[in-house]
């Protein structure tokens, strides 16, 4: 199984693949903070990913937040390889086509349901091009400025892109590059 399958599972299907722990969170929060075991840790057994949510006093809210974070982690950390011969067709993929504005730029906000799948695709292409920004932008049929702006839209996405660049021996991107 892979990201493309795990990310579309229902909450109950995804939870069936996980170990869920509840515990008492420490830290600030007032009188009732430590009286219930409301913090949630989810360990996705097939991928080994672990996410936590402990900001709410409701265990149900924390579980929902943790599942959302797990889905985001799939797109951030799991790469789906794109072969060299497939790169030329990437710009035609629906996930990318539906995220373009009328001017051809990637224009998807972080709260849009298309955002995280698009992050996964952009990072997959970045991996396939050995983290070369100009090649990635060319493959996605966008400008390098638009690509950098998209990568900057979330600190975790920016961090993943720079980790990937480091792995391929490139200098880290600087904001506004």
Image (spheres, helix red, strand yellow):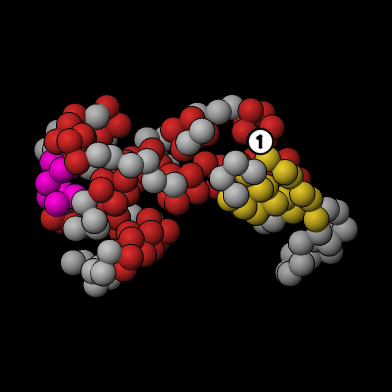
Quarter of the image with the C terminus is bottom left
Task: Where is residue 151? Give x, y as percent.
Answer: 30, 55
Q: Is residue 110 magenta?
A: no
Rendering quarter of residue 108: top left
132 with respect to 161 (left or right): left
Q: Which residue is mark 1?
A: 17
Q: Residue at x 31, y 45 (%)?
A: 124
Q: Say which quarter of the image contains residue 52.
A: bottom right
Question: Is residue 5 something one can see in this rendering?
Answer: yes
Q: Where does the image place residue 91, in percent across and percent down from the top left?
A: 18, 35
Residue at 63%, 44% (x, y): give it: 44
Residue 171 placement (x, y as % from top left): 24, 72
Start and end of the magenta stretch? 135-144
Main secondary-structure element of the magenta-colored stretch: helix
Residue 117 is drawn in which quadrant? top left
Mark 1 neighbour class, 10 Å CA radius: few under 14, some 14 to 19, many 20 or more: some
Q: Secondary structure at mark 1?
A: loop
Name the residue at 25% across, 48% down. 128
Q: Is residue 142 left or right of residue 48?
A: left
């Amino acid at each position: 199984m892979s990201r493309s399958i795990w990310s579309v599972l229902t909450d109950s299907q995804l939870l069936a693949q996980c170990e869920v722990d509840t515990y008492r969170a420490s830290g600030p929060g007032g009188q009732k903070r430590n009286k219930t075991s409301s913090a949630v840790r989810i360990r996705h057994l097939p991928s080994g990913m672990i996410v936590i949510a402990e900001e709410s006093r409701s265990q149900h809210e924390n579980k929902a937040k943790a599942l959302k974070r797990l889905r985001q982690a799939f797109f951030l950390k799991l790469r789906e390889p794109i072969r060299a011969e497939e790169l030329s067709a990437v710009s035609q993929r629906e996930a990318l086509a539906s995220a373009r504005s009328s001017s051809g730029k990637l224009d998807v906000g972080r709260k849009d349901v298309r955002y995280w799948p698009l992050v996964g695709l952009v990072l997959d292409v970045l991996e396939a091009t050995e983290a070369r920004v100009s090649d990635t932008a060319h493959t996605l049929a966008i400008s390098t400025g638009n690509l950098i702006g998209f990568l900057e839209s979330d600190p975790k996405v920016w961090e993943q892109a720079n980790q990937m660049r480091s792995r391929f021996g490139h200098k880290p991107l600087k904001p506004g590059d």
